[in-house]
Amino acid sequence: MYTEYAIVAFLILISIHFMVFGTMIMPPLVLLFGMGIVVFFFVSLHHYSGSWRKLPMDRFYTRLFGHALVYRLIFVGIMLLLTSWLDPDSYPFEIRAMDSWVYHDVGMKVAEGIRNGNMFDVLNETWRSFNDWGHSIYLGFLYYVFGPHFIVVRIFNVLWGALTAVFVGKTAEYVFGRSAGRMAGIMAMLMPAFWWYGGMHLKETVMIFLMVLPCYQAVKLIQTGKLKFLNIIMIAGPIFLLFYYRSFLAPLLILCMGGYLLLNVFKKKRNQGIVLVSAVVFVLVMGWIISRFGFQEHITETVEQSQGRFDYQLTNIAKEVEEISFEKGVVAPFMLAGAVVTPFPTFLDIGQRQLGIYVRFQNDVVRNFLYFFAFLGIWYGVKRKLNDSALVILFPLGYILVLAISGVSFQARYQVPALPFMIILMAGGFHLAKPKVLNRWPMYLAIIMAAILAWNYFKVSIRGLM
């Protein structure tokens, strides 16, 4: 029933855009491709949720991993075909590739630096901050071992993406139960945004894996009450690496994870001694890492650089849409209010710059439609399972808040790291809510469809095309 709601709402949404915007709609083949992805997602979600419902959990995760590998491998090929068709100048990287070319070039220099023993000199000459070192070192190492072949990076993306789907499912299982774990794993396996970024040369797929792994280990530690040295390594190691990927991710994750551990110290029916020791060890290890590698100065620098970024983003947008002026006082409240659900999909071909945006509309549609269940997951998580769900609630909301304050919450690439945690909340909300609450989804869909239509009309109107 819920799958039918989504597909019908999506087809109505496309039809309305055809009636309102006519010839401004994106090329038919691109539209059909995206429509096929959206329909496939919802049909497959329904199919797998039924056919895998009674599988033992070990067997379920084995199948989940295998299917996630296959889907991601197939989409790597699809992305290459899309790029060669729509933007051949960017081949073999993604459509409208800019950062990928930079990462590729720097990766080759780093590989040469590894051979010559001057890798850090190369990084210092290339980047102003070690916030960008992580992906360059990662690519450099792969190029050093396998040669500068783009397909090697994509294959490893497939692996990290499939493992992420498994860890998302297992985390949801610990937090919300087995049924939620199955649904979360299946959604992560099928989520179009994960396929999309897994077929690119960008850092998002690796970065998401480095975020999900320590969160899973922390939740597992709390739920099982078993502390092992490997747990410490699997929590501290990825967080350490995140300092070299995106500046504020590691400090935010440390704060949220520390709060989660402390929240569970005094919880009844849990091994309080293990949890307390875990919290102390976590604080000491993270404190040592921050002090030893000078991350405290980097954190301060990041906060200082974020000041004024909101104004910078508005100015940037204005330049991209023919010098149109955006008033901060008018735009800011809408950006802050819509930070969770944005970006909305674009269906319109109203300029060459829009190609890289409308070609991925399916990613935004699926996410926009499903966030209703994430809101339910937050509500019921706080109300019924706060100790269990605190980490998967605090981190994505904190992350999205930082994006909103920085003025980049409407950019899809920045929103993707929050998606694994929102998927966990979606699955939890679906399984904790009563049917009468779930039956309000069509009302939510109507509101989202109106917002998407308004967004596309806004993009046209500010260009004077309507």
Image (cartoon, grey):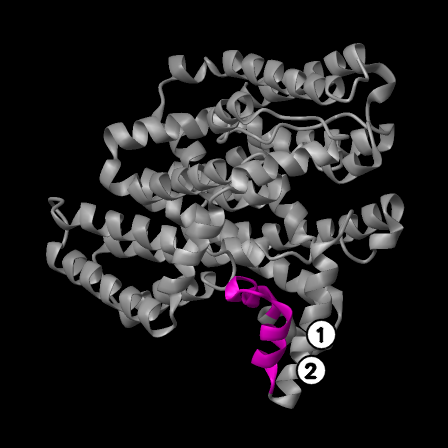
Looking at the rendered structure, the kind of residue marked 2 is Glu
Q: Which residue is mark 2?
A: 112
Looking at the rendered structure, the kind of residue marked 1 is Met
Q: Is residue 206 left or right of residue 182?
A: right
**Residue 285, picture quadrant:** bottom left
Above or below: residue 158 compared with residue 456: below
Quadrant of the image for the C terminus?
A: top right
Question: In percent of the image, x 58 and y 53: which residue is there?
Answer: 204
**Residue 330, picture quadrant:** top right
Asked if disc 1 and disc 2 are in contact, CB closer than 8 Å, the reply is yes
Quadrant of the image for the N terminus?
A: top right
Magenta stretch bounds: 118-136
Determine the main secondary structure of the stretch shown in magenta: helix
Magenta region includes residue 122: yes
Above or below: residue 261 compared with residue 365: below
Question: In percent of the image, x 62 and y 26: which residue is there?
Answer: 326
Q: Residues within 10 Å of mark 1 (few under 14, many from 20)?
A: many
Q: Which mark is residue 289?
A: none
Q: Is residue 360 visible in this depiction of the protein? A: yes
Tell me where residue 414 appears, x and y as whole percent: 56, 44
Tell me where residue 137 appears, x and y as whole percent: 58, 72
Q: Is residue 460 left or right of residue 279?
A: right
Q: Which mark is residue 108?
A: 1
Q: Is residue 208 left or right of residue 239?
A: right
Element carrying mark 1: helix
